[in-house]
Image: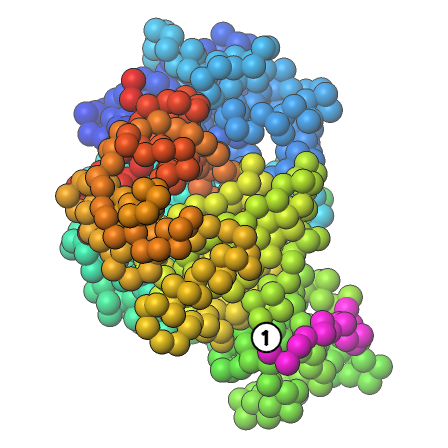
Amino acid sequence: MNIGIFLDKAADKYKDSVYINFYDRTVTYDEFRRKVFVLANALRKLGFKKGDFIHVLVQNSPETLISYFAIQRIGAIAGPVNGWWKAPEVEYLLNDSKGRGLIIEDQYLPILKEIRGECPSLEVVIEVGNSPQPGHVSFDALLNETDATPIESDAKPDDIAYIFYTSGTTGNPKGVLLSHKNVLADVDGITKALKLDEKMVLLCFLPLFHVNAMLTCTFSMGMGHQIILRKSFSASEFWEVVDKYRVNFWSAVPAVYQILLTDPTRQKYDLSSLKFGVCGAAPLTPETFTKFQEVFNIPIVEGYGLTEATCVSTINPRDGVRKIGSIGLPVPGQFIKIVNEQGDELPHGAAGEIVIGGDAVMKGYYNRPEETAKTIVNGFLHTGDVGYKDEDGYIFIVDRIKDMIIRGGENIYPKEIDNLLATHPKIQEAATVGVPDKVMGEEVKVFIVPLDDSLTEEEVVDFCKKNLAGFKVPKYIEIIDGDFPRSPIGKVLKKELRTWGLTPRPKKSKGPEATVEDIFGTMESRVNPEGVKGITANYGYVITGTGGGEWTVSLKDGVVKILKGLDTPNVTTTISAKDWVAITLGTLDGMSAFSSGRLKVEGDMGLLMKATQFFKKYTPPGPAGGEEEKQEELIRIKQVLSISQRFATGPVMGKFLKAFRNKKIMANKCPECGRLQLPPREICAECRVRATDWVEVGPEGVITISDIAYYASPDPLTGESRETPYCSAHFLLDGCKGHETLWHELNPADISRAKKGARVRPVWNEKRVGAITDIKYFEIIN
């Protein structure tokens, strides 16, 4: 059996059923196989052969999966490329594998342009996009060829199917070689463990350049599932998608579940199709685990795995006992042992290294025989994770071996201390490390990001003494001002924390009252890429709900500042500058807006922690008194910040949004100067009088300004997921004048045609609730 035969069996059995639904663009199983044949034949004509590495740098789309299967069909090796890697990382990958081919989406061409001359092995570039660059082969043209001659899949089970490059916290990425047997063994194990039914509906939003999403789409193929494929996770559309497509399950990381619990929009949708959710990558808190199952009456199935073991090695039963905090039981076909340093298996309850055996264990690291030999010993993959089995065989992770502290001969697992301190009401996050000690060998030091500035070291010590054995209580405590050092995907770099040692970090000087600027800072060192000098703008945006309110982002010469604002109604808008910073707001509370990735600044991994701290303890100021006082305060803010009032408060905005239910776009008109306010404002921006008259405008219009924003910062949810590209535009609707524009999203399919003067019309959602999201997007009229 190989992956090609696996596809043939699925296509023969589920021929006319939909395999992929990508924003209502559907591909049946038979169509998918035909496209695979067409591309595979084209790859052969381009000179590719068995054993060649062909890399794929394409965001989530049917083309991504077609590429993987076509490459494997000719015996070549598919090499997914992380879409958030920068040019040096991609250059390293191409040279390490000596890849002959690259299938690349046009949005990543700047990376290729920068490194092409440094990649001598790269011979053929296949471009996914409308107008390929000179010297590139058009992907669309290849798929439009008529040669769909079936290609017999003759790959052996041990032949390599994929090379996935891991990105650890130290050293260069390593190419993990996964065979056809590896992939299909894990597919079989997961299918049995989850007790999957045929023709279920999967929502897939994790990136296909990761093994998780690739494997999810593969095991779904074997069961005739329909995959609702998305570019990335989007909190704003999640429940609507579940309702519209009758989704049965998905795979996600813990933060997704936390966000979904706090999103009140779920109450508007029919979620009865849901059967279960899969969770991995990090532990799910007991509170989230329990509450999600209570609210939605579906199980969360937690699992564990590594790329080196293909993907999933353990999982909690879908039906049966699911133990909170456990990574579950081994999937069928895999064997898990807990061993000591000598490799001896330990009894239940004893902590040791988790090792994995079975057909899903990788072939090895590409061109790294020594590292492979250290990692795979006697057929078992050494994970570097410390864990134990309980009496029922359920596995629990304790910590990473390299992070373990040995104090006076006693083993201390930092994760235990970190997790305990995270429950303290005044602590946002803790990171525990070992520091050298002449007497004990190592002592325990904990770094703390406080949630409350009144937190003292004495409080921390007392809390630990009440909950930990004496030898585990930290000797050194440092409450830091700022955030921990983090990897590109947001993981705390404990190796760097250890280098901090016992020298306290310098503190920022703060005034008597903490302001937004105090907490967030200017972030100049993180947000000041080349080419942004001279960009000066002020933008208003809205976060509503707990800890929410209207805020102002000031962008000047590449420096972002977040300023104070006032409460406003539920409004969604987008702001961006060129392609290096994008901030999107939703009708979520402040913390959810950050943690869902709806608000982010490129390169600033510390922003998430600062935001968490800020929104949990800060309530935005609002003027006392009635509506008149509020309007006076809004005018004062406008004068101070020299920006327009972007949105009104109270009934004016309510009336504007309520009209959306009837597919009407209304502007209010100033009785003195006749200026239209769109979006409406209660007070005319010019005359400072109330604009009480209403006029229906549009719904058609033209584009005045458009801006494609690339979400380049790591997503706090997954560390890597993003929505890109995203095009927002100002639309001058019929009946309006120059500055009276509506800012909204453009249909992603029309991005290539976005230009000033293009005629557009709104596409309305079927279910309209009186919100800005009632307009799905504007589309260009042919």
From where the camera sits, is residue 45 visible?
yes
Q: What residue does disc 1 label?
A: 514
Q: Nearer the viewer, residue 723 or 638?
A: 638
Instruction: Locate residue 743: give its quadrant.
Output: top left
The part of the chain drawn in magenta is: 500-513
Q: Residue at x 46, y 72 (%)?
A: 621
The location of residue 219, given as percent across then percent down, is 33, 40
The location of residue 506, given as percent across then percent down, is 76, 72
At label 1, the amino acid type is: Ala
Image quadrant for the C terminus? top left
In the image, residue 462 above or below residue 583: below
Quick check: is 503 in the magenta stretch?
yes
Q: Residue at x 44, y 41 (%)?
A: 723
What colour-coding does the image apply?
A: rainbow
396 left or right of 238 in image? right
Label 1 element class? loop
In the image, residue 689 above or below residue 98: below
Image quadrant for the N terminus? top left
748 left or right of 161 in image? left
Quick check: is 623 in the magenta stretch?
no
In the image, residue 157 above or below residue 609: above
17 left or right of 471 in image? left
The location of residue 657, given as percent across then percent down, is 24, 50
